Amino acid sequence: MLTRQLGQNGPAVSALGLGCMGMSDFYGPADRKESLATIDSALEAGITLLDTGDFYGMGHNELLLREALAGGRRERVFLAVKFGAQRTPDGAFIGFDSRPTAVKTALAYSLQRLGTDTIDLYQPARLDPAVPIEDTMGALAEMVKAGYVRHIGLSEVGAETLRRAQAVHPVTALQIEYSLLSRSIEEDILPTARELGIGVTAYGVLSRGLLSGHWSPERSAGARDFRSHLPRFHGENLDHNLALVETLRNLAWERSVTVAQLAIAWVLARGDDIVPLIGARQRKRLDEALSALDLHLTESDLARIEEAVGPQAAAGDRYAADQMAILDSERTPAPGV
């Protein structure tokens, strides 16, 4: 397994990470046995970075990982955990809480569910607009000093927030959506992360399945699949985006690879400081993703991909309007910032 350093001063982790969210939530029912088998296969393949969140299935995902890592395998992995998203018993989202007291409470519960003494990378899932980032970072820094957290991360924050956070305590990694269809970080956020020596863990590298090569116009997301609320999966937006996928399929065919492998390889090629997170729920999808590590894209390949799917090529936002409104990473910087 190839490795990449997570940030300028962070640890080496596998060049691909496994995002475990779909094994518990958001994409409809998952097969528990297959989920555990997929995690097992990932570990055997050399994947060390496992990404979860305390709100994935309201604790279900952390308990699943605890089971998967039993038998002394915890020390073989780098556990990344997000926190702060608030949910009701029926699963509805009701905001974010990153107050210092909430940070410490959420951490205590995650440590218990995961069955571990330390979390390798702990990160608020979103910026809490009611809490200065300096306060949240201060609490996280206390937990690092106490030994409960090894590294601090952030998720879906803008360049200004990155700078403010870094002034309090070193940020090891920024988790943010990045794919051929989601490239807004290239203008300001990615250059700032690189300036500050902050690594990037990229989620959504297959754009929630659009770039998997397996989505079709006839397929619809079920009631428990949050893609049913995403603009890119509806009407003319979907038709447009799937047409882009077919263009990529032709390029992939020339290299004897799949669309998914081409899309993952493209993210890998964007820089050694980027670690794509693969949201595979099945072993066959994991195997497909792992093969992207063997695909070296030439300058000609990259130029043709850029011509086929440019920075503004996607139709529709990556989230519904209410979700886009709360993303610090999508806010337009004030003049002069």
Image (cartoon, helix red, strand yellow):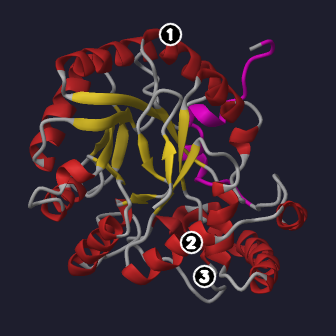
Q: Is residue 57 above or below residue 54?
A: below
Q: What amino acid type is highlighted by mark number 1? A: Ala
What residue is at 34 percent from the left and 36 percent from the top?
Answer: 121
The reply to whether the C-beta atoms of the residues labelled 2 and 1 are less than 8 Å apart is no
Magenta span has 139? no
Q: Position of residue 3 (x, y in %)?
A: 48, 51
What predominant SS class does the magenta segment belong to? loop
Label 1: which secondary element:
helix
Q: What amino acid type is highlighted by mark number 2? A: Gly
Apparent side of residue 256 relative to residue 48 in the rendered image (left or right)? right
Marks 2/3: CA distance?
Answer: 7 Å
Q: Position of residue 17 (x, y in %)?
A: 44, 56
Apparent side of residue 76 relative to residue 4 in the rendered image (left or right)? left
The circle drawn on residue 167 is 1
- The picture quadrant where one finds residue 297 is bottom right
Q: What amino acid type is highlighted by mark number 3? A: Trp
Marks 3/1: CA distance?
Answer: 43 Å
Point out the frontmost of discs 2 and 1: 1
What residue is at 64 percent from the left and 81 percent from the top?
Answer: 213
Q: Which residue is mark 2?
A: 209
What residue is at 42 percent from the left and 26 percent from the top?
Answer: 128
Label 2: which secondary element:
helix
Q: Which residues are magenta?
A: 316-336
Q: Position of residue 59 (x, y in %)?
A: 20, 52
Q: Which residue is mark 3?
A: 215
Q: Earlier in the sequence, mark 3 or mark 1?
A: 1
Which corner quadrant holds the C terminus?
A: top right
- Mark 2: few, some, or many residues within 10 Å (few <14, many ≥20)? some
The reply to whether the C-beta atoms of the residues labelled 2 and 3 are less than 8 Å apart is yes
- Mark 3: few, some, or many residues within 10 Å (few <14, many ≥20)? some
Magenta span has 334? yes
Apparent side of residue 164 relative to residue 224 in the rendered image (left or right)? right
